Structure formats: structure tokens, C-alpha cells
Amino acid sequence: MSKENSNKLLQPELIREAFKQSFIKLSPRYMVRNPVMFTVEIGTAVMLGVCLWVAAGETSQGSLAYNIAITAILFITVLFANFAEAIAEARGKAQADSLRKTRQDTPAKKIFPVGEMFTNEIKIVSSAELKKGDVFLCETGDIIPMDGEIIEGIATIDESAITGESAPVIRESGGDKSSVTGGTKVLSDRIKVRVTTEPGESFLDKMIALVEGASRQKTPNEIALTILLASFTLIFIIVCVTLKPFADYAQTSINIASYISLFVCLIPTTIGGLLSAIGIAGMDRALRANVITKSGKAVETAGDIDTLLLDKTGTITIGNRKATKFWADGIQSEKEFIEACVLASLADETPEGKSIIELAVQNGFVKPNIDKSEAHFVEFTAETRSSGIDMHNMHIRKGAFDAIKK
């Protein structure tokens, strides 16, 4: 699904699922949670009985066509209220299904042990099949399939999907920086990781639980408004019931369809029907901005925010560090500087290194085709934090300042 389509509310698959849920939600056990619409559903059931009564020969309740029309309108009203709530819930479920699919589709290079020694036998399995204690292998460009701890190796990890920080971090075995999170990406080197979480307890699973839970929680204002609407509904029930004695006193005949129609018009049917959808729609709107709201109160708080200050660089960047301009030091020309940058980046497979070459090509520089027999490439690793090339008595290095100095 494209990003453009993911932001559309009325997607065909969501409409089909919401339409199905609209009928499932007709169950009284569910409808009783919304007192306003529950009374409308009761009125629909009563009108259905009146239609059968009129069809059997009763003449005091008006024509059969009139009663059928009232019944149909009431039923459509209840169905529309359920549909409005279901279409909002469907987006939350779709987001959760998307995350769940991501977890299942992430391949894992599982290493199968023999005794206490690990063999070189590696099988590709789904990340959903990994269990606590399993060991898997991750290389440059791989997505880490499950939360775990590095038991061998060192690597640079792109954790922007989790922390929002665009700068890659170094993770290595031993020490307090050995843990990795499922869904992050290995930018360089090769590591072996032991799974440290049980199935269903990973960071991604917790995100799924948040998304699914968010679509079912009511905001404090929504709860208060539900109580208020229930009180109004009770008052109008009393009003409509007392019309019968007055009608008898005035010797006026009022059929059941008129009583129910008047009642539905008096109670706040529209607000009651759309109330649950309003809260869910607020959470969905935040979710489309990649913000997961853990409660309804958080949505209401977000509505009162005028200015939001963020200190995460990844929040307003593309997620990876990217070269945007070449700045020569004045000692050498810009052309010579670009050439040196490109040569030092040929062995750098990280997004940062690739972006330097892309920027040079955009500036009109032709990427050189160097024979490996004539040059020695220094690949970028998390340990050295630098890359470069040695050729024709020339040594060029690019990387962290302290690493180059060392």
C-alpha cells in the first residue's frame, strides 16, 4: 500500500470491514455501551413487531408501508452509527495489522546450535518463529528481526525508526551497549545476536498493543458526555410515555410509530451515534502523524497544544545523515576536494557514504572506476569509524575526527 493511499480514510478494504462490523455491533451486548443508540435499536425492534402486527390485519397503527418506512429509517440510523465507529476502528486495526505483517515478513538468519557450539548452518526463518535464547546473524543492510543482545561482533545500527535520532549508534558485545531492538537496521559489519524476549513481548509487539488499545479507549470528556446524553435520553423517555395519558384524555389516537419517531427526534441521536467515532478519529489523526496515543486523555491534551518543541534530530530529518554540500578548506580547489571525498567514500556502504557519492554525481562529478588491483580500499567499520583508499603513494581517509587522528 502506498503512502498516499494509507492516508485515505475511505479505502475499499476498510469500508468492507467496517460494513461487516456494523452488523456485528448490532448485538445488544455491544449496543448497551451507548445508551442513546441502544434505545434507538429497541425502537427499531418494536417497530419491526408493529410491522408484523399490521401485516396480520391490525388497522389502528396506520398503513404497512408507513410502518415499514419508519422501521427502515431507524435501522439505517443505528447501522450508520455503527459504521461511523467501525470505519474509525478499522484504521487502527489496519495499522496494527501492518505492524504485525512487518514482524512476520522480516527474515531472520537463525543459527542452529549443536551442543554448546554453533555450527555454520544458517537457515532463513520468519522473525515470528524466533524464541528467547535463539541466536541469529545480521549483516550490513539487514533489519534486526527481534529484540536481543549482541554476543559477538560490533556494528553501527540505524535506530531512527525507534528513537528518531538520525545519527547511527555503535552496538557491540559486552558492556552496556550490547542490546539491539527489532525493526532497526544494521549499517555496517556483522553481528550475532541472542534473543532476549519471549514471543509477544518485543518492542514491536508493544507498539501493536498500543495501536489496538488506542482504538478502544474513551476520552474523559467522551465519558462525561455519554453520561449527559444518557440522562437526556431518560428524560425524553418519560416525556414520551406521559403523552399517552394526555392523548387518551384528549380522546386523540397516537400510533406507536409516531411515539417512537418523536422520541428519536427528541433525543441527541446524531451526537450519540458519532460520539465514539469522534474519539477514535482523534487517535487516528495522531497515528497518521506517527504519534501513538496511549489514552484518550492524551488525545484531548494534544488538542490543547499550540507549540511543540522537539530535540530529536531525526524528527525533522529523513532518518539518515545525508550530505547536502561540499565545503572546501580553501587550500585545495572544490573539484579536488570532491574527488577526495568520493575516493574515500567508495568503500563506505553506509547511507552517509552513499549520499556523498550521489551529491558528487549531482554536481557533475563522474564516479571513477578504479581497478582493485591498483588500490587498497579501507572499508567502513563500526570499530574504525572510518573509510578510505590507498593508491599511488596517496592515502585518503574519511570518518570521525578522533578515529582519523588515531
Image: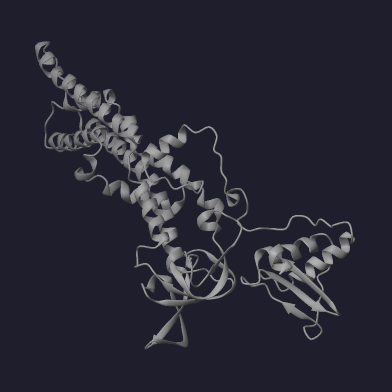
* Count of numbered circles in the view: 0
Give whichever of 236, 231 is nearer the camera: 231
Measured as percent of width and height from the top left, residue 104 is found at: 42, 68
Q: Residue at x 69, y 69 (%)?
A: 386
Residue closest to the eye, 52 or 94: 94
Above or below for 378 versus 8: below
Q: Where is residue 111 shown, x and y percent of the image?
A: 44, 82
339 lies left or right of 38: right
Q: Residue pushed farthest front?
A: 406
Instruction: Determine the residue positioned at 41% across, 35% down.
Output: 300
> Where in the figure is residue 25, as x and y percent of width and height?
27, 46
Q: Is residue 351 above or below residue 21?
A: below
Compare residues 170 and 266 and report the one nearer the observer: 170
Q: Is residue 254 above or below residue 137?
A: above
**Who is closer to the viewer here, 54 or 217?**
217
Left/right placement of residue 212 relative to residue 55 reads right
Residue at (71% x, 71% y) in the render? 387
Q: Quadrant of the C terminus?
A: bottom right
Rendered image quadrant of residue 384: bottom right
- Residue 383 in sight: yes
Q: Find the residue positioned furthest to the top.
A: 250
Residue 400 visible in the current orientation: no
